[in-house]
Amino acid sequence: LDLLSRSLEIARKEGTPYLEPGSFGGLGNIHLGLGDREKAVDCYNQQLARYRHLGDRRGMATALNSLGNVSYLAGEKERALDYLNQSLNLFRQAGVRQWEAATLYALARVNYSIGNLDEARTQIEAALEIRESLRANVSRQDLRESFFSSVQSGFELHLELLMSLHQQRPT
């Protein structure tokens, strides 16, 4: 917390444009980890404002993604969907496939939690497809295996979702 606060001071003093929003994002993550959602939201909003000022789509998408996740954790699921959909559009515009997949996973998680099972299924399957295409481009087998283990939660959500859909509409 102290280091990021100091980096924020330096960014302001030195006029380093990208250090400031990055510091706000890091501070938001720490506050969220400490359970202070209000401070986290404030930091993410500061981050978003600075990235907007810079015209940085990827940065804006990252801040919106963080705001979406905080909203989901706070039980504000409609707000979470709004932030996450904005984030998804920006990640797609910026061509950041890994974060596009992560945002689709987050959207699927929110939609699943509010009972939008078909939408959640579409999103998680799109996320898994992107992640598989990224994994396939990794040349070393050990790295592909490591990558696979890092996306395990997506497969778990997909399985849970398919079981819920089967309960709802047995074939």
Image (cartoon, helix red, strand yellow):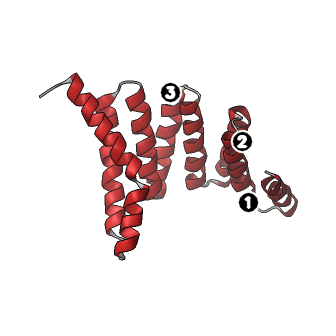
Mark 3 residue type: Lys
Q: Position of residue 65 (x, y in %)?
A: 55, 43
The quadrant in which the C terminus is found is top left
Q: Position of residue 141 (x, y in %)?
A: 34, 73
The mark closer to the camera, 2 or 3, is: 2
Residue toward you, 20 or 143? 143
Q: Position of residue 137 (x, y in %)?
A: 34, 70
Q: Quadrant of residue 133?
A: bottom left
Q: Position of residue 59 (x, y in %)?
A: 60, 53
Q: Is residue 50 visible?
A: no
Mark 1 residue type: Leu
Q: How busy is the neighbourhood of tag 2: few (under 14 within 10 Å), some, or many (20 plus)?
A: some
Spatial separation of the CA atoms under disc 2 and disc 3: 20 Å
The residue labelled by disc 3 is: 77
Q: Is residue 1 visible?
A: yes
Mark 2 residue type: His
Q: Quadrant of residue 7?
A: bottom right
Q: Earlier in the sequence, mark 2 or mark 3?
A: 2
Q: Residue at x 34, y 55 (%)?
A: 130
Residue toward you, 61 or 119? 119
Disc 1 secondary structure class: helix
Name the side, left or right, on which 25 lies relative to 152. right
Q: Quadrant of residue 140?
A: bottom left
The mark found on residue 19 in the picture is 1
Residue at the bottom extreme?
140
The residue labelled by disc 2 is: 31
